[in-house]
Amino acid sequence: MEANSVIGTVNKKGQKIVDPEYLFFEAPRQQYFMTGSEVVREAIRRASVDISVAYPITPQSEAAAMVGDLYVEGYVGDYFRGESEFAVMSQCAGASFGGARVFTTTSGPGTLRAYENFPMWAGSRLPILINVMVRGINSPLNIQPDTLELGMILDTGMLIWHAETAQELFDYLLKGYIVAEEPDVHLPIAVVIDGFFVSHTKDMVMIPSADLALTPYNPYRSPVPCMDMEVPPVRMMRDPFVMKSNYISYATHASWQQEIRAAIERSRKHTIRLIGGLIEEENSDADILIVSSGTAVAQGREAIRLLAEEGIRVGIVKVKTLRPFPHEEIRQATKNAKLIFVPEFNVVGWMAREIKAVIPDNHRVIEGPHVAGGMTLPPEVIVEEIKKVLAGKKEVVHG
Amino acid sequence: MRKRVNIRMSGLGGQGVVTSAHVLATAASKEGKHAISNPFFGAEKRMAPAESYVRIAGERIYDRGELVYPDVIMVFHPQVITLGKCYTMPFYSGIKAGGILIINSDEPIPLSDDDLGFLEKQNVPIFTVAATTLAVETAGTELATNMGMLGALMGATRIVAMDAMEAALQDRFGKKYVASGGTATLDEAIKKKFAKKEQLLAKNMETIRKGFDLGAAWAETIKTPMLV
């Protein structure tokens, strides 16, 4: 069955299945003012999701509950609450093995509790979409946004897209399925937002009609057989290589891990087509650049306005996809920059590390400003940091 | 209008601080302005500090999260000041020059000479409004305190028009609304107070209008009112 064959048909909820590109780029959209949680509900309403498993943890609980409403209304095929995040992600795996389109959400400590499943999803080539709404994970307990957990999931083998706004959240949730389910990709995808700053913030968003729905998942396009325990690679779960400890078991594991990374890279062409590039640039010819992802970019945009009023020109490079990481794009966009500031909502500065690892002359990178534990990052703080560095430029850059 | 108006609402859990921010931002967006609202709280419980923030502008707003430099600070409960139930100390920290403070209290709250001196230097007048008393007298419930506060803000600054506010209230209370457990419980409590949704909306609007009148009267007494 080709996915195309269902285009133009009507699903059991009465929604018309349309070509994804029509839904993304052509279908008329109406303006709404809503929270990020409500945006999740509206995206999933149109996403032809077969099953969603939920577990409560702030700040994703509202969105998870609203997906439950969609099940009651008949927009989502099945929905239940798992016993813990570990159980939820395992149940998601089961559903995806069985050929279902799966949606789930988590946050902070939940992400970490679920963690073991993420590389398992990737290794099993399950195109599950998880909406991660980041929050503090460390003790003392914290429910506010902090991107530390995002730094920890970078190399799980999932695709990772970081939305800046409610609008991007809506679009990434739908487009994410299409990219993740491509036969040459077929990997889980984390669509990440900063908890509260996006999930609980009311913002303007353009949404197409609820009478339209995404083409359903076609499990027969999977590069690996669904739920077939006799055929590699899934067979390795029933008859695991780990029991053999011979050269071929190591070689299989290593080559399969390489294949997952290669699949992440192969997602580029689909991603670029659907979300318009892995990075977004504004005045990137400026001597001073801000490079980051998510809300840190939003705060950077305000800082740029404040600095422009003082005659200081600063550009911005937004990293939209953390995996695949846009190495070459970032190298090109920053090639003329003399100073590269990386504001972040976490204590360690993992984004600065990522950028430093891929650009030449990385002494140009100023790690910060950082806030952590859910503190806000006022644009004024970014302005202050940039001015401080400019004032003592030689000392800081070469020191 | 000012290029950007930043409003910080400090109150206690259960007072409708978060709802106020969302309703105000919705009203502003209905007028075609750019607006963003978001809450800030710890574990949800009544009487614990809760804050919310509204940013309104004629241009696209990117800034989000806790509002550090507000033009307007609305204090929904005297304990925000007297018991320090506030995310920022002092409660007026970060207020911009020429801003205003709107404090819900039956009597002006005594502030130290240092506080008063700072606010005077910053040209920040204090508007004390008995919003809870107004809510009880008008709507028959202290749960309408937030409506009194919104009205007071609108009267003092004209930040949004009355019909936009009415439309925003329709959005919030006129249809099914999914919120967190605590908010849902309070929604149920307030809906039980009124036989019909229309009655709830009418009483809320009446509280807002009376708050507006108090705000407008106060603005008359100020040399340079912050009309936006």
Image: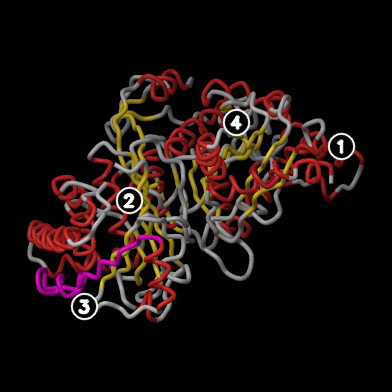
Q: Chain of mark 2?
A: A
Find residue B149 and report its horizontal and vertical position in percent.
23, 63
Q: Identify which residue, B143 or A212, lies in the foreground.
A: B143
Q: Amino acid at mark 1?
A: Ala
Task: Tell me if I can see residue B45 in this picture.
Answer: yes
Residue A42: x %, y % from top left: 35, 40
Chain under numbered label 4:
A
Q: State which tag comes first along the sequence, 2 or 4.
A: 2
Q: Say whether mark 1 and mark 4 are on the same chain.
A: yes
Say which residue appears at 52% left-offset and 53% top-offset: A106
Q: CA distance from mark 2 to mark 3?
A: 42 Å
Which of B106/A298 is in front?
B106
Mark nearest the camera among 1 and 2 is 2
The tag earlier along the polypeptide, 1 or 2, is 2
- Residue A287 at x, y = what percent? 68, 29
Tag 4 secondary structure: strand
On the picture, is A72 further left or further right than A220? Answer: left
Residue at point 59% right, 61% down? Answer: A373
The Cα–Cα distance between marks 4 and 1, rounded to whole angstroms, is 45 Å
Q: Secondary structure at mark 2?
A: helix
Q: Is residue B127 magenta?
A: yes
Q: Which residue is mark 3?
A: B106
Mark carried by residue A69: 2
Disc 4 or disc 1, which is closer to the eye?
4
Label annotation for residue A315: 4
Q: How far apart are the two marked residues, 4 and 3, measured between alpha carbons?
A: 50 Å
- The span picked out in magenta is B122-143
- Name the one closer to the observer, A372 or A196: A372
